[in-house]
Image: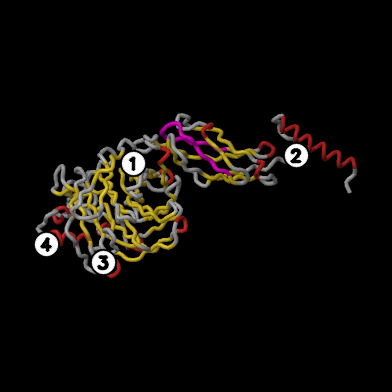
Amino acid sequence: MPSHTSRHTAVAAAGGLVAFAAFGLAAPAGAAAAATPTISLSSAYLSGAVGATGDPTVTVQVAQSGTDASALTVTASASSRTSVAQTGDVTVSGTGASRTVSVAARGQGYTDLTLEVTGSGGATATAKLHYAASESVQAPADTRYLTGSSDASAAVDVGDGHVVVADDESNVLRLYDGSASGAPVRTWDLSDALGADKEVDIEGGTRVGDLIYWTGSLGNNKSGEYKADRNTVFTTSVSGSGAATRLSYEHAYTKLRDKLVDWDEANGDRYGFADATADGQVPKQIDGFNVEGLEFAPGSTTTAYLGFRAPLVPPQNGGKALLVPVTNVDQVLASGAAPVFGAGIELDLGGLSVRDIRKNAHNQYVIVAGSWAADDNSDPYALYRWDGVAGHAPSKLRDLPTSDPGGWESVVSVPDLDTAGGRVQLITDNGDADLYGDGTAAKDLTHDAWKKSRTVRFPLS
């Protein structure tokens, strides 16, 4: 058993260490120094937006040998560009080994934020968070940001606020919580299943039962070259719902473009599909060939409408938007049956074309109408209501704002259009947008956490 003298010496030594630490002095030679704490980030890159609600966050893990994690403090100690975010704009929440860091952006641009953990004995460690902030947008309280990709091109509701989003720059499907900003819950890269070397250029998707039908644009690429992978329509089966959603690849069909050209030529070449798909013809022109919408006919599980971004009919200012029914799309995908087309449906959308089309359980349709041109961030957009019946005219619901980055590309879900106060959820394609003011298109950003699309819930009246 230690003597009274030895116990007194130990206490005095410990007290001396505390005293030295309290006055910022070095501990005496031979004294035990506190272990260096550790700090790590769930992601070194984070994006936000000025004035945003519920921006993405990062998780910080901290530890120190011999010290309870709850005794550690985490702060932001420096910012490389205070016009974007200052240390006081960083909030650290939570206790224990795991903390959550959020940032309230002051201005557009980039900054490196230094996060510092302080442990017992005053020992510290730091980590860098590379932060990017985009400009403020209209209706920020109704806006959320889907990170990991900027090129959202089609979206399908899978319940409990969750949505599967396609990307026209890859063959990856992403599951998001559509009510929260942040990274995907789960992803599926279908390149191998599709046998695709390049992007399918997924532009439309819709669900019937436990199957989701997806379509590529079917057109040439932006250089006017034919790329076989774009001539793809495919299905995925759905199991579960919400965050538990799982997708499985089912079938693909790779001749729909060719059959559309044959059908049009057999019917007097009314829509000019043969010329529009010729080598050298770009898809996004008023007489081009480019599919962007896909939805089933009223009450049908076999007839699907293909919505065309181009051509307009006739191909001139003020022309009508085009839908082409595929009356046996179920058999086309399930067994490779030759597609059967119904008569083209021409809709007056005020000189705009179909960018997406979605219906609800009441067979009420909402059409996102936009330009056939490629300059998405400035051309007009509008929402139209339709009943899905050929020969019936659509009616305009409202114009959509165009001052914010990105083109309106996808409808997630449609409320009951006869009930006051309904909101429709839309998603933008931000691929060509300069989000952070440095002249870099979002699709070309080097970090996926900085790439993002917007989802917004718009009132319909």
Which residue is rendered at x = 42% and y = 55% of the image?
159
Residue to which mark 2 is pinned? 31
Which numbered disc flags the more N-terminal residue, 4 or 1?
4
Position of residue 241 in the picture relative to residue 461 (left or right) = right
Given the image, on which type of amino acid does mark 1 rest?
Answer: Ala
Helix, strand or loop at disc 4?
Answer: helix
Q: Is residue 133 magenta?
A: no
Given the image, on which type of amino acid does mark 4 rest?
Answer: Ala
Which numbered disc flags the more N-terminal residue, 1 or 2?
2
Given the image, on which type of amino acid does mark 2 rest?
Answer: Ala
Residue 325 screen position, x and y as percent: 22, 59
Closer mark to the observer between disc 4 and disc 1: 4
The picture quadrant where one finds residue 304 is bottom left
Which numbered disc flags the more N-terminal residue, 3 or 2?
2
- Please determine whether, in this image, residue 236 is positioned above or below residue 459: below
The magenta-colored residue range is 99-115
Q: Nearer the viewer, residue 419 or 40?
A: 419
Dot 4: within a 10 Å radius of its alpha carbon, few (fewer than 14), some, or many (20 or more) residues? Answer: few
Circles 3 and 2 in contact, beta carbons < 8 Å: no
Closer mark to the observer between disc 3 and disc 2: 3
Q: Which mark is residue 332?
A: 3
Residue to which mark 1 is pinned? 441
- Please determine whether, in this image, residue 441 is positioned above or below residue 186: above
Which residue is rendered at x = 56% and y = 33% of the image?
77
Residue 453 screen position, x and y as percent: 37, 45
Which numbered disc flags the more N-terminal residue, 1 or 3?
3
Helix, strand or loop at disc 3?
Answer: helix
Q: Which mark is residue 266?
A: 4
Given the image, on which type of amino acid does mark 3 rest?
Answer: Val
- Please determine whether, in this image, residue 76 is positioned above or below residue 220: above
Closer mark to the observer between disc 1 and disc 3: 3
